[in-house]
Amino acid sequence: MRIAYVTVHVAPEIMQGGVGKKIKSQISIWREQGHEATLFSLTPVQIPFPEARQFIFDSQVNLLKREINRSAELKRMLTSIRAYQPDVVYLRFGLYSYPLHWLFKIAPVVLETNSNDVEEYRKRGIFFYWINRLTRNLLFDSACGLVVPSRELAVMLAPDGKKPVCVISNGIDLKEVETLPPANNQSPAITLVGSPGMDWHGVDKLIKLAELYPDLIVNIVGYSKNDFNGETIPVNVYLHGFLNQKELQKILSKTDVACGTLALHRKRMEEASPLKVREALAYGIPVIIAYRDTDLHDVNLDFILRIPNTEKNMIENAQRIRQFAYAMMGKRVPIEAVAPYLDQRAKEKTRLAFFQEIIAIDKSK
């Protein structure tokens, strides 16, 4: 197969983090399996994907001019995709820009979406909420199939069962990750990787935990002081801003416990498979999970602490969390205990098989 991987509206810092790492790994595995794959990305700045075809628009202008620039580059990207002659297009869901709907005339499109987009854009403000509500069906209705990371999303986005849906939870390429040596801290260190403006990550909850227990070391990656509007941050909370993979690994090497998403309920969701949890486990770091994990829900390990998906989950379970953090000091998760649930190579075989199914359905029409 010849696969065009398409991204629009993915922030550069996100592409430089776990999402970008996932995309690189996916494309690499597809190529290893004998397929041709290229990333086509509409972006405001150059991203670290040397083999990608990048279409860069000027975003340092007023809103109208920015959208005109974005649309012009999108047209160029669509022309390039058409010339590539893909057998299938894999589109990562993003806010619609004109004329993205042209993409569906090039080849069968499989749409990947990783969240409840209606609730997510509601939290980004009324403008983005209504733009998404008014245009999202241009993408969902035109897609030949959907890929989602949870059974909950499959039911939510395709309740009538008429459109092919494949549930593939997030994974990690275990060949690219080695277990980190145990941290050697005097007090337990808890780390959360998040992004400003995404309150379902629950950064505020972790800060309240730090206020309650000054003996805990709390690392928050992705946030800086400017993201808290002058709010006083406890002295035991360390804000690291956005980090590249090498810098993040350095923080994780000093981490005893990593947090998954702590407030998924704010998006009216119960199930997820965050990349940050898979990466932490692959490095051997015990984790706190506050939702139903698609892969790990029934896995019984002392290295996983589960708490409810509620607004007060961190405060109501604060003592359990502190005890867990102390119990995990100097320990690492045996990779063989979690590898079967995390292996991205197995997940990509499922994804490729779904692509072939979609291509066959399209040819039969």
Image (tube, grey):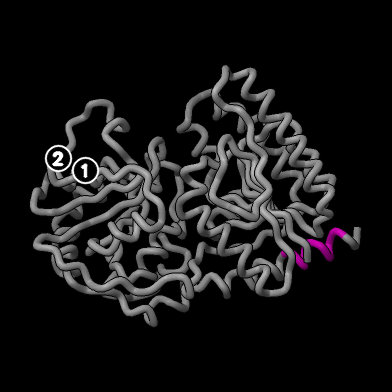
Assign a secondary structure to mark 1: helix
Assign a secondary structure to mark 2: loop
Q: Residue at x 55, y 29 (%)?
A: 129
State the CA–CA distance, disc 1 to disc 2.
7 Å
**Direction from residue 18 to residue 302 in the image, left or right:** left
Q: Position of residue 38 (x, y in %)?
A: 70, 56
> Is there any visible trace of residue 158 in the rendered image?
no
Q: Position of residue 112 (x, y in %)?
A: 63, 53
- Looking at the picture, does residue 335 appear above or below residue 347? below
Q: Is residue 253 magenta?
A: no
Give the labeled residue for mark 1: 207
Q: Quadrant of the N terminus?
A: bottom right
Q: Residue at x 65, y 66 (%)?
A: 351
Q: Position of residue 154 (x, y in %)?
A: 60, 56
Marks 1 & 2, CB-CB < 8 Å contact: yes
Residue 57 numbered mark, or none: none
**Direction from residue 54 to residue 36 in the image, left or right:** right
Give the labeled residue for mark 2: 234
- Looking at the picture, does residue 1 appear above or below residue 156? below
Q: Is residue 360 magenta?
A: yes
Main SS class of the magenta portion in the image: helix
Magenta-drawn segment:
355-362
Q: Quadrant of residue 245?
A: bottom left
Question: What's under tag 1, amino acid-wise?
Answer: Ile
Q: Viewer-proximal residue, 119 or 199?
A: 199
Q: Viewer-proximal residue, 74 or 340?
A: 74
Q: Quadrant of the C terminus?
A: bottom right
Question: Mark 2 or mark 1, which is nearer the start of the sequence?
Answer: 1
- Viewer-side label of 1, 2: 2
> Is there any visible trace of residue 152 in the rendered image?
yes
Question: What's under tag 2, amino acid-wise?
Answer: Pro
Q: Position of residue 231 (x, y in %)?
A: 21, 29
